[in-house]
Image: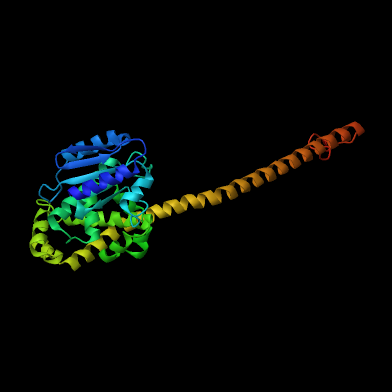
Amino acid sequence: MLLGLALCIGAVRANAQVEAPERLDRGRFTAVYFPSERLLAHSLLDEAVRTDTFPGLPRPVEHVLIALAPDRARFRDWVGPDAPEWGAAITFPDSRRIVMQGRYAGADAADPREVIRHELAHLALHEYLGDLPPRWFDEGYASYAGGEWGRNDALAANVAIALRGTPSFDQLDEDLSGGSSRARDAYALAYRAVSDLAALDPAHGLSRFFAAWRGTGSIDKAMRSTYGITFDAYESRWRASVRRRYGALALIGDLSVGGVLLLVLIMPLYVARRRRERARLATLLAADEAAERAARRGAIEALLRGDDVDDFGGDPPAAPQS
């Protein structure tokens, strides 16, 4: 850990132009940052100390180093070329180190407190279970521990679930390494998988499952002993549940969007047709008025000539007979 801290501080100093790096220690956490990130560093460490427990796990004890990058270039330099472009923070479990974007993070980045909670959950899970969790579970648990309820919104709007079904856990691992859109959906599904698993035991959550997993080294054996279900059976049940729960919502949302698009396309045609009808009606009314005016002029001219035309334009009444 000391080596990791020295390397991180060395990298910070090597990139420093005018400002010198600073260090802040709180409990089991150390933050390394530039003065421009001082307020963020204090806020994050306060939050980390205040919420330093994670669902289903014993309280972590390992020391954690948090490095706040003052700009995008140094963030990329510190995390390496293999990290995804859309990541707001990267965790290195073996060295218990978190590299996180600082104040410059764009509007699409999540709340920094939510981000640090997510990354610390990775480390807490790794501290207790080592490398046992597959990636989908690791990311799903970090989202679950971070209370990222907004993940459900991505599922409710995911038409792919309705059309193609829910991917397997192995497919989730692949999608997590894909582009930002695929990864977003995979994070949401992984969150749902872990939260649904915790809901199987409302009294204990994930605590007994984690203890069994650590003791046996097998996720299948842990599920069997804790929830009375095999891993494969849980995966099948979960995929069907997600499709039922979110597939209809996605289709409804898609139909709603389609309805709006259809309205946008049809509305100009409807307006044009209404205008044509109004123009045709105006033409007919004008023709009727012209005909009435011509009829009135004809009646007046007949009277002036002395034609025997009654008020109604017909023949004069016959004389009465005795």
Residue 285 image offset from top left, x and y in percent = 71, 40
| Residue drawn 62% across the image and 48% down it | 273
Q: For the image shown, how many numbered marks are present on the structure?
A: 0
From the viewer's perspective, is 144 left or right of 303? left
Residue 139 image offset from top left, x and y in percent = 25, 55
From the viewer's perspective, is 101 left or right of 97? right
Give the position of the C terminus as an image quadrant.
top right
| Residue drawn 78% across the image and 40% down it | 291
Tell me if I can see residue 228 in this picture: no
Residue most toward the right? 305
Nearest the camera: 231 or 201?
A: 231
Tell me if I can see residue 42 in this picture: yes
Give the image's coloring scheme.
Answer: rainbow
Query: Is residue 52 depicted above or below 200 in this figure?
Result: above
Query: Is residue 119 depicted above or below 316 in this figure?
Result: below
Residue 176 image offset from top left, x and y in percent = 31, 59
Nearest the camera: 236 or 213?
A: 213
The quadrant in which residue 114 appears is top left
Residue most toward the top? 304
